Image: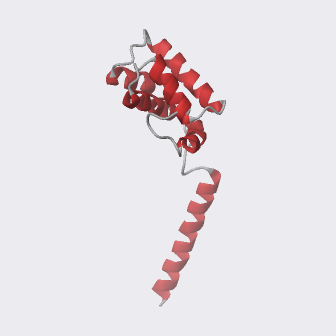
């Protein structure tokens, strides 16, 4: 019985430490932009033909600006299909994923909200 009481106290103490840590932000680091990974991912995939890494980053940051301005997922996909992928839906989707994950992860919520009713081919 004494062993159960000690375990119970230890469990409670651990739960309190983890709860305090989570509240303080110890457990989940904030998402940060990673332009190097973005450029590498775009270059590995191919088909985008940006003249340089800087041009790829500038284009990606422009996409972030569009998301921040409230443009919908469908509008952004449409822009990318015209601008850099020759109309390829899959390539456009890949680029949006790389942009949101590596350049502006703080905007994933608004982008996700705008993508809820998106249907490929319909804008």
Tell how many labels: 0
Instruction: In the displayed orientation, state which residue is furthest to the bottom.
Output: 1
Residue 111 image-quadrant placement: top right
The relative height of residue 62 versus residue 8 in the rendered view (above or below) is: above
Residue 86 image-quadrant placement: top left
Residue 26 at least partly seen: yes
In the image, taking residue 3 as reference, residue 20 lies left or right, namely right
As rendered, which of 113 and 105 lies closer to the eye?
113
Q: Give the colour scheme shown.
A: secondary structure
Give me the residue at 54% from left, 35% from top: 73
In the image, taking residue 114 as reference, residue 119 lies left or right, namely left
Give me the residue at 61% from left, 27% from top: 66
* Residue 64 rendering spot, x and y as whole percentages: 58, 28
Residue 33 at least partly seen: no
Instruction: In the displayed orientation, state which residue is furthest to the right.
Output: 69
* Residue 62 rendering spot, x and y as whole percentages: 58, 21
């Amino acid at each position: 019985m004494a062993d159960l009481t000690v375990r119970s106290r230890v469990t409670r103490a651990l739960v309190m430490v983890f709860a305090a840590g989570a509240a303080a932000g110890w457990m989940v680091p904030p998402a940060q932009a990673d332009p190097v990974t973005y450029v590498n991912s775009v270059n590995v995939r191919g088909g985008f033909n940006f003249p340089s890494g800087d041009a790829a980053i500038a284009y990606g940051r422009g996409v972030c600006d569009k998301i921040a301005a409230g443009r919908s997922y469908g509008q952004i996909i449409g822009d990318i299909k015209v601008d850099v992928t020759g109309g390829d839906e899959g390539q456009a989707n890949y680029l949006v994923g790389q942009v949101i994950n590596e350049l502006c992860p703080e905007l994933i919520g608004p982008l996700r909200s705008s993508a809820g009713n998106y249907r490929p081919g319909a804008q």
